[in-house]
Image (cartoon, rainbow, N blue to C red):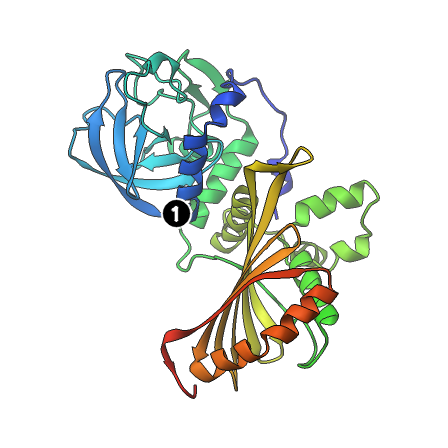
Amino acid sequence: MLPRELVAAVVRTGPVLPVEQLNDPRQQAFQRALAPQLGKALHGEVLAKLTDGSFVVKVANIPARMQLPAGAQVGADVPLTLVSVNPRPTFQVGTGANPVFSEAGPPLPKGADPGKAPLAMREGSAPQAGAAVGRASALLQATAAGAATQTLGAEANNTTLSQAGKTIGGVLAAAQKADVPMTAALGRAPIVAAAGLDAASIAAGLQQAIGKSGLFYESHVAEWAQGARPLAELNAEPQQQLAREGVRQSPLDPATAQFINLQLATQEQAQLAWQGNLWPGQPMQLEVQRDTREGHEEAGEPETSWHSRLRLHFPELGELDARLTLSNGRLQLQFAAGSTDTADLLRRHMGSLAGALEAAGTQLAGFDVRALPDASPHD
């Protein structure tokens, strides 16, 4: 989806902070807690002002340390928008024509030296310079202010923002103008042709639907350039189809910008959302998220868990919401059913499910079924 003009030379930037600081467990926990709020408007309550000029601000019930514009007062309410989670949570502060962007992190421990803080803030730093702003916020700030250069970091190193940065900033700003936010890739055709097909057919159809959704178009183009993917597969994706029809998409069109924003969010959060038809007339919503946990390593590799949520509404079974967690070949499964009859039916067939999973090489490590609060005996 990204247009050709986004490709530009990499220019010199200011120094980055040591990697050890980015791996602070408190910072990682802070990022995980804020990830679901990406792109959302939040309110920050200013709790305290530190001696280095930064503030402690409560955001989503989490005390965070950040720079604020001049004149910020303890006890004030500050409008914030979370624009990036990595490498650190970054907020747009305020809603004016020339917003300020600020990185955030956990408050300093009692007695800690502000000069050695992970946000690289120092006494006398102007709020607009402050800490080095994150990738997404820098792009947005450049677009809003129309700036060609920015001053980043405590040492006031000058960095020239590339044309690619300006364009991506414009894309993200255009995405915010859409009336209805795009939260999932949309399936253009049913996953399978009819009900009753086996699991292997459904899995293959789902793989095709997501792979051809356009979310991963750029990586597929790179694979094609290396000879690892045939052109025929690219031709099935929406970007390639539009290009073959002579349609030139503008990255500043709200619909196009929203899809690019969805691509960036998928990459940023390691989370995929898709909705479409499982078979004709049978809608389905799917969410998949990868979670790599440190501290649970085997053979030097971090433990990776996959969290999925599947939502369906069947004519006879009613509403069905399934949450799955797969880790090291062990599956935990939770069902929420729209009727008590459906919940009972699922419980009766738990043994069959466990057997089918075991035959496929997966152990059913947990199974729970509950009826939704407003469920009736017959949906």
Task: Give the vertical position of 174 relative to 124 (above or below).
Answer: below
Say if residue 185 shows up in the picture.
no
The amino acid sitting under disc 1 is Gln
Q: Where is residue 3 drawn, in percent x and y?
A: 62, 43
Q: Which residue is mark 1?
A: 37
What residue is shown at x 69% (from left), y 81% (from top)? 196
Label 1 crowd (10 A; few <14 / some 14-19 / many >=20): some
Q: How many marks?
A: 1
Q: Quadrant of residue 223?
A: top right
The answer to which of 74 and 374 lies nearer the viewer is 374
- Say what secondary structure mark 1 lies in: helix
What residue is shown at x 36% (from left), y 36% (from top)? 91
Say whether residue 174 is left or right of residue 40: right
The answer to which of 191 and 136 lies nearer the viewer is 191
Q: Where is residue 213 drawn, in percent x and y?
A: 64, 58
Task: Give the vertical position of 370 relative to 150 (above or below).
Answer: below
What residue is shown at x 61% (from left), y 45% (from top)? 304
